[in-house]
Image: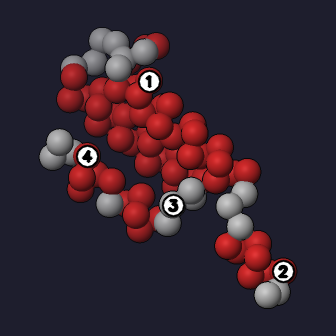
Amino acid sequence: MSEEHEQATAFGIRQWVGTVVGPILFVAVGLGLGTFDDLPFAARWSGAVVALMATWWMTEPIPLWATACIPLVAYPL
């Protein structure tokens, strides 16, 4: 395989960081840690989904199309 193909398929440090930081932000915002504790329940969890998606869009631990589908699953729950 070529070096370019290996780089394109490798799971780099950016993806690992996003895999860990995204869910941590999701839980922190959803539980109202920090300055988010005065928001209503639905607003906190909507913000948590946005924080997770923004982190995963920037770090790309999963494909962008899969990240874009997160609200389709999360918001009805």
| Secondary structure category for the residue under label 4 | helix
Q: Nearer the viewer, residue 74 or 38?
A: 74
Number of disc labels = 4
The quarter of the rendered structure image containing the N terminus is bottom right
Res 68 quadrant in image: bottom left
Q: Are marks 4 and 1 in contact (CB under 8 Å)?
A: no
How far is the residue under mark 3 from the one under mark 2? 21 Å
Above or below, 63 against 29 in this view is below
Q: Earlier in the sequence, mark 2 or mark 1?
A: 2
Kindly report the distance in space between the C-alpha atoms of the residues bearing marks 2 and 1.
Answer: 39 Å
State the SS at label 2.
helix
Q: Which residue type does callout 4 highlight? A: Ala
The dot on residue 62 is 3
Residue indicated by mark 1: 28
From what the image shows, is residue 31 above or below residue 4? above
Give the residue type that dot 2 points to: Glu
Residue 74, disc? 4
Q: Residue 28 location, x and y as percent?
A: 44, 24
Q: Residue furthest bottom?
A: 1
Q: Earlier in the sequence, mark 4 or mark 3?
A: 3
Name the element at disc 1: helix
Q: Residue at x 68, y 61 (%)?
A: 11
Asked if the residue under mark 2 is in contact with the one under mark 3, i.e. CB atoms within 8 Å, the reply is no
Mark 3 or mark 2, which has the lower sequence index? Answer: 2
Upstream in the sequence, badge 1 or badge 3? 1
* Precedes in sequence: disc 4 or disc 1: 1
Left or right? Give the position of 16 relative to 41: right
Q: CA distance from mark 1 to mark 3?
A: 21 Å
- Residue 50 spot, x, y in % from top left: 39, 42
